Image (tube, rainbow, N blue to C red):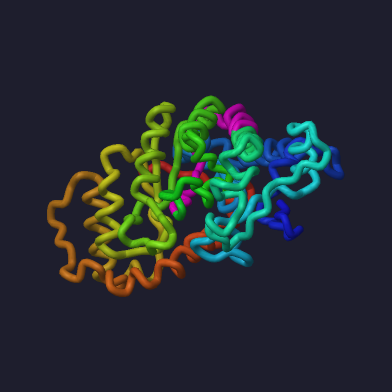
Amino acid sequence: YKDAEGKETKEYISLFADAVPLADQRTPLKMYGDWFQAFRKEFKKELKGEPIVEIMVGLGPCGEMRYPSYPLDRWSFPGIGAFQSFDVHALKSLRIAAQNETFMPPHVNYNDFPQDTSFFSLNHPSAYVSSTGRFFLDWYSAALKQHGTDVISIAQKIFKKVRLAAKISGIHWWYQSPSHAAEVTAGYYNTNSHNAYLEIAQVLKNAGAEVFDFTCLEMRDSEQPEDAHSGPEELVRQSQAAAEAAGLHFAGENALQRYDQSAYDQMLVYKENLFALTYLRMTQALMQPENLQRFRCFVLAMHGDQSDCTIPDNRQSLLQRSAWLPEVKEMAADSTSRCKENRGWLIFGLLAFVSAAA
C-alpha cells in the first residue's frame, strides 16, 4: 500500500494487486489459495470438523478487513488516518473507473481532524458529500469488499467442514461526527446514507463466511476523550445488528488489554447476542490473584453461571478509573499494535480455533 506522500505499508499486500501476476506468474489471490491448500493438507485430520471448528481468514492488516489507514509509525490517536490508494495498481483502477487519466484520490493527513481537511468538510466542492467525493468513496469501499469476497470465496471452496470467520475493526473515533472520517479512510463507508457494516456483512455472507468478528466490545463512550467524538457502544450495536440482518453469527473481542470489572461488565452487555468472545490477553498481569479471580467470575457470567464466585472488592484493579481516562490515547495506540504480536498467525491469512473438547 502507498499513501499520498509515497510512504509504503508492507504489512499486507495491496488489494489492488490481487490479480497482478508476480515473478512466477502467480497472483496474490492464487498464492492465498495455495497456502490454504497447504494448510488443509497439513491439518487434514484436524479439519474434519473437530478439533478445529473455525478458521478466521485474514483480510488485511492485523487480520482485519480494512486498509492500513492508521499505521503506528506515522499516526496517533485520534487522527483520521489517510487513504491508501496511491500505489500504481490503485491509481490505474481508480482512473479506469473514473474514465479520467489524471484523477487523484483525496489527500488527507494521518493526524488531521475532519475539520482540518477540505475533503471532510461540508463546504468544499469536492468534499465527501459531493458527487466526486461519493464516487471516490464508492470505488474505495467497493475494492475492499471485492477483496473480502475473493479471499473468502477461495477459502470456502477449500475448507468445507469448518466455519469461516472474518474480523472487522472497531474504529470508534469520529463515529459521532457526520463524516465518520476514521472509518472512511479504513474503507468503511459509513456516511452518506451508507451502512458500512451491513454492506460488509452481506458480502461476507454471500462469499461463504459464517462469523462476523468485531473489536472494542469493552469500551464505553464515557471513557473516550471528548475531542475524538467516539461512539464505541453505538458502533458495536450497529455491527451487531448488521451481522444479524445478514444472517451471520456475531463474535467479538476486547480491543485493549484490560483486567478491570468495568471492561468485563461492558462486554457482558452484549452477551445475549454474542456467538463467541476472544479475550485479550493472557499475561503476567492476568495471573495476579485478584485479576484472575475477576476473570474467572467474568467467564462464569458469560456462561450464565456466577455461583461460587466473589468479585474482588477492588473492582478496577490495575486500571483505576481515575487513572484510566488520561491513558486513553496511549491505550488506543496499544490496540493498534496488538496485531504485531500475532503476526506469525495472521501474516498467512489464517487463525484456527479448536473446540473446547479438544
Q: Quadrant of residue 344?
A: bottom right
From this view, report whether residue 217 is shown above or below residue 156: below
Determine if the magenta segment contains residue 152. Answer: yes
Residue positioned 61% across, 29% down in the render: 153
Residue 159 spot, x, y in % from top left? 56, 32
Q: Quadrant of residue 74?
A: bottom right
Please provide the residue range marked out in magenta.
149-172
From this view, report whether residue 200 is shown above or below residue 331: above
Residue 274 spot, x, y in % from top left? 33, 40
Residue positioned 71% across, 37% down in the render: 29
Residue 25 spot, x, y in % from top left? 85, 38
All told, the count of numbered labels is: 0
Q: Is residue 22 rendered to the left or right of residue 353? A: right
Q: Nearer the viewer, residue 57 or 195?
A: 195
Q: Is residue 33 rendered to the left or right of residue 87? A: left
From this view, report whether residue 135 is shown above or below residue 109: above
From this view, report whether residue 225 is shown above or below residue 44: below
Q: Is residue 58 visible?
A: no
Instruction: Assign the C terminus to one quadrant of the image.
Output: top left
Q: Is residue 166 visible?
A: yes
Q: Nearer the viewer, residue 123 or 255?
A: 123
Residue positioned 35% across, 56% down in the render: 219
Residue 156 spot, x, y in % from top left? 57, 29
Q: Is residue 351 rendered to the left or right of residue 331? A: right
Q: Nearer the viewer, residue 231 or 203?
A: 231
Determine if the magenta segment contains residue 19. Answer: no
Residue positioned 50% across, 63% down in the render: 77
